[in-house]
Image (cartoon, grey):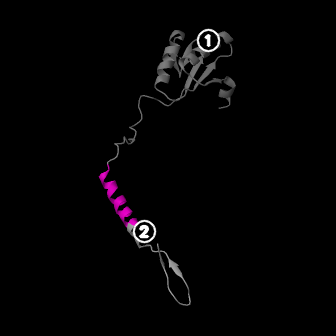
Amino acid sequence: MGMGLVGGKRGIVSGMNVVPLIDILLVLLVIFMIIPHRQKGLQAALPQQAGPADPRVPDETVIVAIGADGSVRINQSAVQLDHLGVRLQEIFALRSNRVAFLQADRSLEFQAVAQVLDLMQTAGATPVGLLSSELEKNR
């Protein structure tokens, strides 16, 4: 900054000398233009496009049905009660959606239904919905 004295009617005139500030600004501009070209950043793993969906995994609803005679079916495929838990674990291992439904005959005792429901929850089915024959009639 400089101050100039000028005689006359206006009195003292003071003004800021910005030439040194412009020089500093130009030096900083040159520095910031050169520095990015000499730096090398870290390698980043960019996300890749997902491949095609697994064709082995059907996206159908899992319905476990218990017949009046005690037979168990998973989506119309007969399964022994002893192998129900293992089969459901195989199905849910390939899926991200673990929703399953339980449909039982009205004539069954609750103990049989509760046993299958427990097997379903142990296999990883969450949540388990209950289907009734009244809902099927309205379809």
Could you tell me residue 12's position as x and y percent? 54, 82
| Quadrant location, the C terminus | top right
Residue sitting at x 34%, y 63%: 30
Residue sitting at x 37%, y 66%: 26
Query: Which corner quadrant of the image does residue 42 belong to?
Result: top left
Q: Is residue 61 above or below residue 79?
A: below
Residue sitting at x 67%, y 23%: 133
* Majority SS type along the magenta span: helix
Could you tell me residue 15's position as x and y percent? 50, 77
Which class describes the residues within 10 Å of circle 2: few (<14), some (14-19), or many (20+)? few
Give the amino acid at mark 2: Leu
Query: Which corner quadrant of the image does residue 68 belong to?
Result: top right
Q: Is residue 114 left or right of residue 30?
A: right
Give the amino acid at mark 1: Gln
Could you tell me residue 45's position as x and y percent? 37, 40
Q: Is residue 123 left or right of residue 41?
A: right
**Which label belongs to residue 125?**
none
Query: Which corner quadrant of the image does residue 113 belong to?
Result: top right
Numbered disc in front, either 2 or 1: 2
Identify the secondary structure beneath mark 1: helix
Name the residue beneath numbered marker 1.
115
Magenta stretch containing residue 54, yes or no?
A: no
**Which label belongs to residue 21?**
2
N-terminal of the pair, mark 2 or mark 1, is 2
How far apart are the two marked residues, 2 and 1, measured between alpha carbons?
Answer: 84 Å
As drawn, the residue found furthest toward the left would be 38
Residue sitting at x 49%, y 14%: 86
Residue range in magenta is 24-39
